[in-house]
Amino acid sequence: MEHVLDGLVSRYEHGNCSRRELLAALGALVATPPVRLGAARPAPPFRCRELNHVTLRVKELERSKQFYSKLLGLPLLQEDKDSCRLGLGRGFLSLWQESVHGFDHWCVGVESFPSTRAGAEDRTRDVVRDMLVREGYSLREDEGDSTIYVLDPDGNVVQLEARGFR
């Protein structure tokens, strides 16, 4: 508010508005009720810092790998019988051979997230999962996978991992 008043007075002092215009503007400011911002939103449970990777299900792994390598120049980082990872800047594109093709999930690197090392950190991931469920988030759980997958309202899957996850 102070900068608005300073600006009005400065305009008046430099002859850019009349005394009448200054008084009218000041009257309007006084008559206008203060703006109340909505209730402060609670802090989100995580702060996203990077798009880590996108995972696609493909019918023919070799064909898809060649397509993305040729079209976008993505280098092969890792490969096995049914999947591969192609370099994508600091992240990667993951391709999984499946009978049904399409989008599987996208992964974001977040701050303050437990590492993937076995042991006590796994229990911490359980605590994070429990907290998300308590806050009303729906989760996808894959057998034997310690990753946290959260479903958006349309059923799309967001994977949460530590920054720099590989």
Image (cartoon, rainbow, N blue to C red):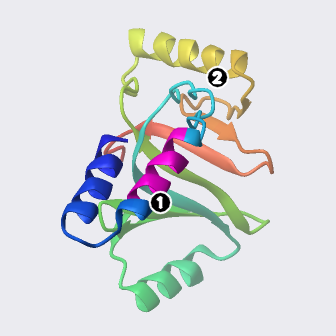
Q: Is residue 104 left or right of residue 10?
A: right
Q: Position of residue 129 (x, y in %)?
A: 61, 20
Q: Is residue 123 left or right of residue 150?
A: left
Q: Quadrant of residue 74?
A: bottom left
Q: Is residue 123 above or below residue 28?
A: above
Kindly identify which numbered label has been placed on residue 132. Answer: 2
For the residues labelled 2 and 1, the Cα–Cα distance comes to: 33 Å
Residue found 36% across the figure and 33% down from its top: 111
What amino acid is labelled 1 in the image?
Answer: Asp
Q: Nearer the viewer, residue 125 or 22?
A: 22
Q: Which residues are magenta?
A: 22-30
Is any part of residue 24 visible from this angle?
Answer: yes
Name which residue lies at 31% across and 41% down. 2
Q: Choose between 130 and 93: the one closer to the eye.
A: 130
Name the amino acid, label 2: Leu
**Judging from the image, what secondary structure is the residue with disc 1 in?**
loop
Q: Main secondary structure of the magenta part?
A: helix
Q: Looking at the image, is mark 2 or mark 1 earlier in the sequence? A: 1
Q: Nearer the viewer, residue 32 or 50?
A: 32
Q: How many marks?
A: 2
Q: Position of residue 163 (x, y in %)?
A: 34, 41
Which residue is labeled 1 in the image? 80
Examine the image and state in which quarter residue 90 appears.
bottom left
